[in-house]
Image (spheres, rainbow, N blue to C red):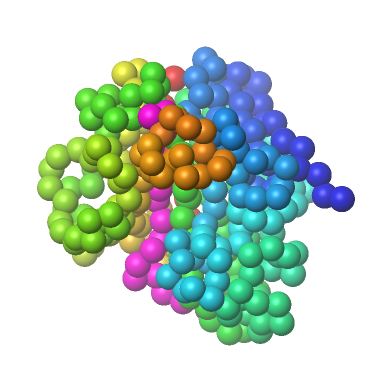
Amino acid sequence: MTSNDPITIKHTKSGAQCTIYPFGAHLTSYRTGSGKELLFLSRDAVLDGTKAIRGGIPLCFPQFGQPDKSMPQHGFLRNNYWKEVGGSRFDDDESAGISMELALEDVVNSRGGKWEVGTKLDAKCTYAVKIDGSGFTTTICMENKGQEPWDFQVLLHNYFLVEGGMALDGEQCNVKGLEGYMVADKVSGKDYVHGADAVTVPEIIIDRVYTPPEGKMDLNLAISAGSSNSLQLSAHGEVNGATVPVSGVVWNPHEAKAKAMADFGDGQHVDMICVEPGLLSNVPSLEGGSKASFFQKVTCKDP
């Protein structure tokens, strides 16, 4: 039986550490060198490998949400056991880290559609996590191991911890850097261009996709997650050797939807905000034998 015992990575020099579960290669905790936690994990999260973990950083691939109804929501990366890459652990003066990998042949859960068992498509994903005293980087590499090209989306579903339960306070919890992005609001059904105001959590659920304007490639955001928790997030993607535009998603389920989720602690919606970089639109198909990579860096300005 495969074990889902958590893996702890420590950066000796700074004192920073993180926790990763093999099921989903799921990063559930990162603490700065001073011990500040940056990631939210639901008190009711299921950690035994029977379902995706609520909180931390779920990995979404080959789709975000469920645009293709023949495949499960968010794809299969978060619902399968990954293997540690042999010899990948390190701990030096600058940082510490680990790499995990998942081949399509080892995917037993959440397949479907063109990725169903017996498909001619083939893929291998490698996920690298690196930490230092003030932040972390996560890099997912997707390789087309077959001959036929395949289309995809990929997203890092970051759940950030909001200090003091202040997620609904726009002065204490907000996201800046999305000026000029096209917004698809999944709650109101409206599409519009975002102005200069910071994005905040309204009095109802927020579920919005922010698509960059033409010519904008990398995502660079400033996130306030409490009075003394200021984060910088940057993300960059490449497919077939070419840079592609990075979208962003902002989500908070609010009270009613949180209560409807068995693995989301009642009232904990005030403790989190999801700010999620992804390759969601204008993503070219990955050619046979080619690779795509998606990278994010999260830094705490006051670690």
**Left or right: where does residue 103 sit relative to residue 207?**
right
Q: Quadrant of residue 258?
A: top left
Of residues 99 and 224, the one drawn nearer to the viewer in this rendering: 224
Q: In x, y percent, where is residue 39?
A: 50, 32
Q: Which residues are magenta?
A: 270-287
Residue 122 x, y percent position in the rendering: 65, 75
Could you say where residue 123 lies in the image, as x and y percent from the top left? 64, 70
Q: Position of residue 266 (x, y in %)?
A: 48, 32
Q: Residue furthest right?
A: 1
Residue at the image position 12 percent from the left and 47 percent from the top: 195
Q: Is residue 272 magenta?
A: yes
Q: Is residue 246 visible?
A: yes
**In the rendered image, the vertical position of residue 174 relative to residue 195, given as above or below:** above
Quarter location, residue 301 = top left
Q: Residue at x 72, y 36 (%)?
A: 6
* Residue at screen point 47% across, 45% down: 260
Is 36 colored magenta in this rendering? no
Vertical side of 289 occupied by 241: above or below: above
Seen from the viewer's position, the closer of residues 124 and 253 is 253
Foreground of the two, 117 or 155: 117
Q: Quadrant of residue 93?
A: top right
For this view, does 302 lie left or right of residue 90? left
Q: Residue furthest top?
A: 34
Residue at 44% across, 20% down: 303
Report if residue 289 is visible in the image.
no
In the image, residue 183 above or below residue 159: below
